[in-house]
Amino acid sequence: MIDTHSHLFSEEFELDIDSCVERCKENNVNKIILVGFSDITNIKAQELAKKYDIFYPTAGIHPEEANNDYLAKFNGLKEFIKNNKVYAIGECGLDYYWDITYKEEQKKLLRLQCELALELDLPIIIHMRDATKDTYDILKDYKGLRGVMHCYSGSYEMAKEFIKLGFYISLGGPVTFKNAKEPKLVAKGIPLDRLLIETDCPFLAPTPFRGKRNESSYVKYVCEEIAKIREMSVSDIERITEENAKNLFKI
Ligand SMILES: [Zn+2]
């Protein structure tokens, strides 16, 4: 399996990162996309990827980082990517859930990162919360852009629209929650060749660890739940999502 969205560099793992990586291998999680989202975490992702060959680092600027300094932050990102190998741009996107003070800056920052992804021929990792329409309206402007809607929580209808734009849909812990109607519909309905799995650890742990620290080895619970929903074998979902991740991230 491939966890396509992990923040294992977070301080939550400082004391037991070795055993976390070990548990991944024991559970057949052999590749992990290590997702940066700010100056500091972009560096942390690089550092951790140097220690363990299981990791594939990315770099991006999260919408919650958007403020009056967005352009300087973007230029910093550009410079960083010149000097470091990354497998994707992101995570980036729009988040109107917490704070909409810098809505316009969020949009500009997303557009800049879309352009950068196209220029460098890299996939983009999109974070979207309470901002479906604006996100769609921006992404549709970039023909040829490929990427993933990470921990997708939108509607099945919109998932199909993002797929038409060339995006993959990644499902995480919430698809295992009992009352998660929409993610289950998405898991059942989207074409298999557009499906990815992830943890977004340390956040959003799947059942039976809901509310606790999440880690990359738990991606197997996401895989099992999707297999159940689609009435397929776990090994088929493993194989298909692995293939998809390899295609998208070129790993
Ligand atoms: Zn994330």
Image: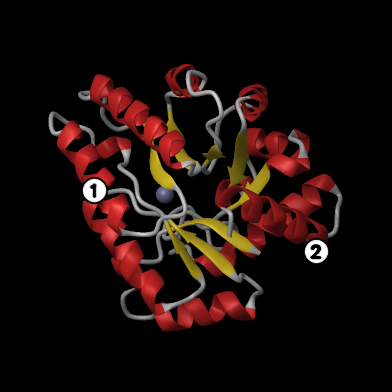
SS assignment at label 1: helix
**Residue kind at label 2, given as amino acid type:** Ser
- Crowd around label 1: few <14 · some 14–19 · many ≥20 (10 Å): few
Residue at left 86%, top 49%? 231
Nearer to us in this view, 76 or 5: 76
Residue at left 38%, top 78%? 51
Nearer to us in this view, 105 or 111: 111
Residue at left 54%, top 23%? 143
**Residue matched to label 1:** 79
Nearer to us in this view, 211 or 139: 139
The answer to whether residue 25 of the structure is visible from this angle is yes
Give residue 222's mark: none
Residue at left 61%, top 23%? 158
Q: 242 left or right of 173?
A: right
Vertical position of residue 160 compared to residue 194: above or below = above
SS assignment at label 2: helix
The answer to whether residue 97 of the structure is visible from this angle is no
- Crowd around label 2: few <14 · some 14–19 · many ≥20 (10 Å): few
